[in-house]
Amino acid sequence: MTNVHHMTDTEGAVFHEVAVIAGSARRRSWSTEEKVRIVSESLDPAVSVSAVARRHGLNPNQLFTWRRQLRDEMAPWLVEEREEAPPAAPAVAPTG
């Protein structure tokens, strides 16, 4: 990231600094495939979500948002799968 600083002199000795941010600090666009790959990587219980986010230059909150979006998109599919499963055998209590 490149920072360009401009100093302005107003009313003698009073200075105001303006920072212009250029480079990678711009809004980035991620393809669906990239998002799925990064979210999949973050689902590993042995890996920190924050570490995955840092590795890919993301804010952890963004990665948590992608994870929630994936979960919400998958929820109807998971419910349908549970409804189609055969019912469990009834438990029989031992007698005597």
Image (cartoon, helix red, strand yellow):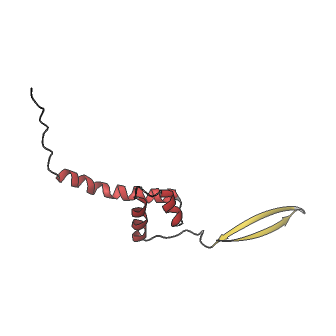
**x, y percent for residue 38:** 43, 65
Outermost residue on the front side: it is 96
Q: Is residue 75 left or right of residue 42?
A: left
- Figure check: 86 above or below 63: above
Q: Is residue 13 left or right of residue 21?
A: right
Residue at 14% x, 37% y is 91
Q: Is residue 93 left or right of residue 56?
A: left
Residue at 41% x, 58% y is 67
- Figure check: 88 above or below 70: above
**x, y percent for residue 62:** 49, 59
Would you identify the image quadrant in which residue 81 lies?
bottom left
Residue at 31% x, 58% y is 74
Camera-side residue of 50 and 27: 50
Camera-side residue of 7 and 82: 82
Q: Quadrant of the C terminus?
A: top left
**x, y percent for residue 30:** 46, 70
Outermost residue on the right side: it is 12
- Figure check: 5 above or below 72: below
Camera-side residue of 43 and 2: 43
